[in-house]
């Protein structure tokens, strides 16, 4: 039997079909201190999100690295990453967030597609499509028909952490729940994944402001 606390705070209990209600109650009661500890950690890590101001010198993440913003008067696109800086047209500041979301979404789609293709054969999976969008509190999800969905903010994470997110969702094509068998598949594809999982749990909230 196994009990986990999902990113949104939901409790998931996995048990064999023959387990009785009495056995399940006893198991959950024994795990209550662990559950409360995990929920308290999530509350502590859920820091208030400070929105961006889109001013000169402000930092914006891309694959774990922070790039400073520079407001300019002329360029051939509203937003570009060039010369180690994000360059935004001064006239587009009112719509800056939309431009950043669009830019991140396009880069995330291309980058994640490459990582999924790289790991597909070794994991024995064949995703039918990869979609990047706003998934709320989830970094990714695995949908019906072997479709993979990723939050556009995944591209803000360090590359190795973003790879973990991709591999995590690809493993769900074999196992829909976070069972021991699921984590074995993740470990096989990404040895030492536990460090990336822990980093994401501790620092993931830090990349959510935009």
Image (tube, grey):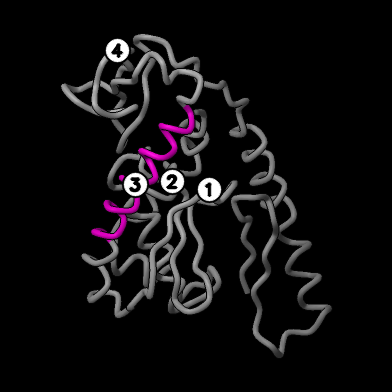
- Tell which of 23 and 164 is nearer to you: 164
Q: Nearer the viewer, mark 4 or mark 3?
A: 4
Q: Could you tell me which secondary element the residue under label 4 belongs to?
A: strand
Disc 3 versus disc 2: distance between alpha carbons? 8 Å
Disc 3 versus disc 1: distance between alpha carbons? 13 Å
Image point (51%, 29%), residue name: 209
User: Is 104 part of what is drawn in magenta?
Assistant: yes
User: Residue lying farthest bottom?
Assistant: 18
Q: Could you tell me which secondary element the residue under label 2 belongs to?
A: helix
- The earlier-in-sequence mark between 4 and 1 is 4
Quarter assignment of residue 96: top left
List x then y, in percent, for residue 60.
37, 25
According to the picture, the residue beneath numbered tag 2 turns out to be 152
- Tell which of 197 and 76 is nearer to you: 76
Image point (35%, 30%), residue name: 61
Disc 4 versus disc 3: distance between alpha carbons? 22 Å
The answer to whether mark 1 and mark 2 are in CB contact below 8 A is: yes
Q: Is residue 126 above or below residue 133?
A: below
- The earlier-in-sequence mark between 3 and 1 is 3
């Amino acid at each position: 039997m196994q009990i986990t606390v999902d990113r949104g705070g939901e409790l998931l209990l996995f048990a064999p079909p023959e387990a009785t209600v009495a056995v399940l109650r006893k198991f959950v009661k024994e795990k209550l201190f662990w559950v409360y500890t995990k929920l308290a950690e999530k509350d502590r890590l859920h820091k208030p999100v400070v929105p961006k101001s889109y001013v000169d010198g402000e930092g914006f993440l891309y694959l774990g690295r922070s790039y400073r913003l520079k407001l300019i008067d002329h360029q051939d696109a509203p937003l570009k990453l060039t010369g180690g800086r994000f360059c935004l047209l001064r006239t587009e500041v009112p719509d800056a967030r939309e431009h950043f979301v669009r830019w991140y979404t396009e880069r995330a789609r291309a980058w994640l597609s490459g990582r999924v293709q790289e790991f597909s054969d070794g994991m024995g999976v064949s995703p039918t499509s990869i979609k990047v969008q706003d998934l709320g509190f989830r970094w990714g999800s695995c949908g019906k028909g072997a479709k993979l969905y990723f939050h556009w903010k995944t591209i803000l994470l360090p590359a190795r952490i973003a790879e973990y997110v991709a591999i995590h969702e690809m493993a769900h094509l074999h196992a829909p729940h976070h069972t021991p068998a699921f984590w074995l598949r993740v470990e096989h594809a990404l040895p030492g994944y536990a460090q990336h999982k822990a980093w994401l749990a501790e620092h993931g909230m830090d990349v959510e402001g935009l």
